[in-house]
Amino acid sequence: MLERIRIVLIGTSHPGNIGGVARAMHNMGLADLALVAPRCDVITQDSISRASGADHLLHQATVHSTLEAAVADCTLAVGASARSRTLPWPMISPRELAERLPSECQPDSARVALVFGREDSGLTNAELQRCHAHVHIPTNADFSSLNLAAAVQVIAYECRMAWLSQQHIQQQAAATASSAPENDEALATHAELERYFEHLERTLIAIEFHDPAQPRQLMARLRRLYLRARPEKMEMNILRGILSAMEKAADQR
Ligand code: SAH
């Protein structure tokens, strides 16, 4: 999923910010960086130093003269902006954006563009209107503009969290599929449980805990308890062993 997300920077004017973006991206596992009409050199001492070891992203970055060219192959483009607009665009939070990513990044060929504006003037209305949605990082209303690399960091973090939870769900599904119980992990069958319930009832009568003339739903409640626990065969054997020992003790008494 992460390899299908492209960070697009429009008209960036400080190499240090481009380096900071590369670092934020690499920290979160993103690698596709596209620059639209940058207003500065991309590979400079400043950008390399701010990239702190992620400068391969700077070397791999693609440079385009227009936003259209940078996002031509994308099926979803989302523009990041601190400002609301006179003609409001569908607005989402970084988390809402992230929740959409697992499905938006399907199939393998899908590409999602996250578009960021200039340090001094952000995205124009025309640029935002080329995007499907406007993502706004919730901030102090009186001081809403983050540094470019910081804004990328916040959104890239949400992308990573969405990816991690997708991984987690997939791992759980794989674990459930591969945990077809075997040997002593196998679950007790219906017939084994029924034999156990009969044995349990007999024993409870023998130790005078249970009076079949006044059942008070006891066996139903116990059934519910054991069925909830999904006992394994081996556990069932232990429980039956306990019942046999109780029966023996009751006999001796
Ligand atoms: N002064 C500019 C903001 C520049 S910050 C303006 O008035 O719009 C550089 C870029 O970082 C912005 O264009 C935007 O893409 C991103 N950014 C900064 N703060 C943001 C926020 N609160 N929500 C979403 N994106 C933000």
Image: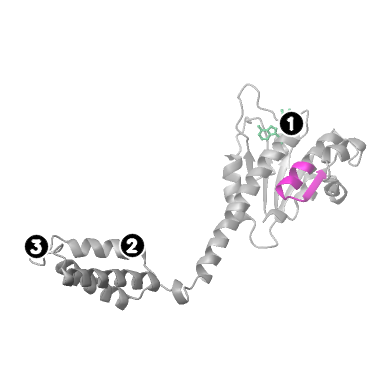
Q: Is disc 3 placed on a helix, strand or loop?
A: loop
Q: How is the image coloured?
A: one colour
Instruction: Kindly tell me whether residue 176 is visible in this rendering.
Output: yes
Residue 232, percent from left and from top = 39, 70
Residues shaded magenta: 23-35
Decide which of tag 1 and tag 2 comes sooner along the chain. Answer: 1
Q: Is mark 1 within 8 Å of ligand 1?
A: yes
The residue at 83%/48% (across/down) is 57
Residue 170, percent from left and from top = 57, 61
> What amino acid is labelled 2 in the image?
Arg
Select label 2 or label 3 by which is in front: 3
Q: Which residue is mark 1?
A: 147
Q: Is disc 1 placed on a helix, strand or loop?
A: loop
The answer to which image quadrant residue 196 occupies is bottom left
Q: Which mark is residue 228?
A: 2
The residue at 48%/73% (across/down) is 180
> What amino acid is labelled 3 in the image?
Gln
Instruction: Kindly tell me whether residue 74 is visible in this rendering.
Output: no
Q: CA distance from mark 2 to mark 3?
A: 25 Å
Q: Which residue is mark 3?
A: 214
For the N terminus, the quadrant is bottom right
